[in-house]
Amino acid sequence: MTLGASAVEETQVTAPALVSLREVGKIFPSGLVALADYDLDVREGEILTLLGPSGCGKSTVLRLIAGLASPTAGVINWSAPQVKNNIGVVFQDATLLPWASVFDNVFLPLRLKGVPREAASPRIEEALAHVGLLSFSRALPRELSGGMRMRCAIARTLVTRPTLMMMDEPFAALDEVTRFKLNDDLLALKRRFGATIVFVTHSVFEAAYLSTRIVVMSRRAGRIIDDIEIDPAIPRDDDYRSSRTFADVCRRASQALRVSIEEATP
Amino acid sequence: MIQKPSAIAWRDIGVPLAVLLAALALWEGLVHWKNIPPYILPAPSVIFAKLIEDRELLFSSLLVTLGVTFEALIVATVCGVALALLIAQSKWLERALLPFAITLQVTPIIAIAPLLLVYLQPGNAVLVCAFLVAFFPILSNTSLGLASVDFGLRDLFDLYRASPWQKLIYLRLPSALPQFLAGLRIGGGLALIGAIVAELAAGASGQGTGLAYRIVEAGFRLDIPRMFAALALISLSGLAIYGALAALSYVLLRGWHESARAQDE
């Protein structure tokens, strides 16, 4: 079902899946079943949010797509191998090298690909300019605020121009004002670079504000409870935050979350 | 609270210095007041005079001891880091090699020294003793550092498909640096102790030229002021080594590691 507009059916038809998970299962060596029979399509160009209580397997989905873990069952199909080889991930922590400057941290992905510093320099400066950190390029991570560290981590993913960007609760540790600002900045970057984004959060409001689609996951082995579409054409601004559509999305996502938590309690 | 640099310098250097001077004054006063003869307890002024009087002998011995200490520390650093890297490559190597390193560490060096003196020239035996005690803290601390890389950073390097070599250069070695430096600081002090202990053991054979030998020799002659003078030089050397390595650590970690940050604030 689609909220907000009618034009979404069209997107559903035209946008092909960038990556599809089919009957994917993940059992950890401890015997914990994180995912079972999990199906998910990440469609080109969307901002897909995985919403769910902690321990529902949303981070596991992200790690499986990123190739940081392998599924114990099922398959992950890619539309093209070059998509798989150019994924950007923003982790829960900024995960910056504490001994390296902002510039060197953003340089890291290119350095690991063997790009010389001089050749990489314009791209690094461009990425830093996009997140507003150009004047901090020589600073060390500990001299930055939490929000600035996250910006640095985002610049680091931008520098490789990824087709698919995955973000694992990136703004969870930040204060609300900083989070709102970074949400808007992320949407601006998305408009500019056009990458497909998979976003993990446990905040209903953040999900409703950012996403073009919200998938609500159950704590029980990652079962999908609801799949909410939001018209991508709606401008995301303060008006949207107080709109009827936003309220509807939040209500529906909250209801699904409640189901998800009740399911988990035996 | 922000303190002026001068205030920090006074607090960190001035206080211990004042206590030291007070203790020396008390010592000096006690010796004069109780008329203690110098062959039982020499006054600080007598020890200082002796230091000046015997300077050529004592300082050449100091150079010998420091030379052994530094040679041992350099060899221990190279071997300790190399073995730590080797052990980090595989659990099997760790299982095979670590027990021997630990055995060498837990056996008191003073018990190994006589045996080494049987097999080696006294000079080499002293060097090997100093090496053996300095080696283990560098090995174990570097191993710990190489093994304690942040999980998030490890994921990041996996994501960008870094080669094992790139992970070593850009991630594991810098991550291990703080622990390595802590090991080096301990190793530096222990190298001096190892050099002194081995020379004391060798001293009986009468071939030493380092400071420990001067202590043994002065003991035979009941030249107590010279014993104290040699002892003072050993203490000062230990302090200087520790200070130099602590300064090195501060310079390398300043700005990013918590240990150096605590001193900043």
Image (cartoon, coloured by chain):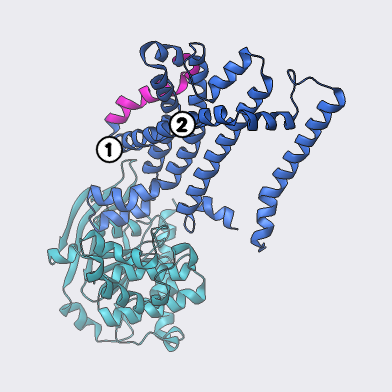
Chain colours: A cyan, B blue
> Which chain's residue wears label 1?
B
Residue that appears at 44% across and 58% down: A262
Nearer to us in this view, A186 or A154 = A154
Q: Position of residue B121 (x, y in %)?
A: 38, 16
- Residue kind at label 2, given as amino acid type: Thr
Span colored in magenta: B93-112
Residue B25 seen in the current view: yes
Queried whether the magenta region covers residue B106, the answer comes back as yes
Is the C-beta separation of discs 2 and 1 under 8 Å? no
Nearer to us in this view, A7 or B151 = B151
Residue that appears at 73% across and 31% down: B44
Horizontal relation, residue A96 to residue B198: left or right:
left
Nearer to us in this view, B247 or A58 = B247
Q: Position of residue B38 (x, y in %)?
A: 75, 21
Residue B174 is tagged as none
Horizontal relation, residue A70 to residue B69: left or right:
left
Q: Which residue is mark 2?
A: B69
Answer few, some or many: residues within 10 Å of disc 1's Cα (few below 14, many 20 plus, some between 14 and 19): few
Q: Quadrant of residue B212?
A: top right
Residue B89 is tagged as 1
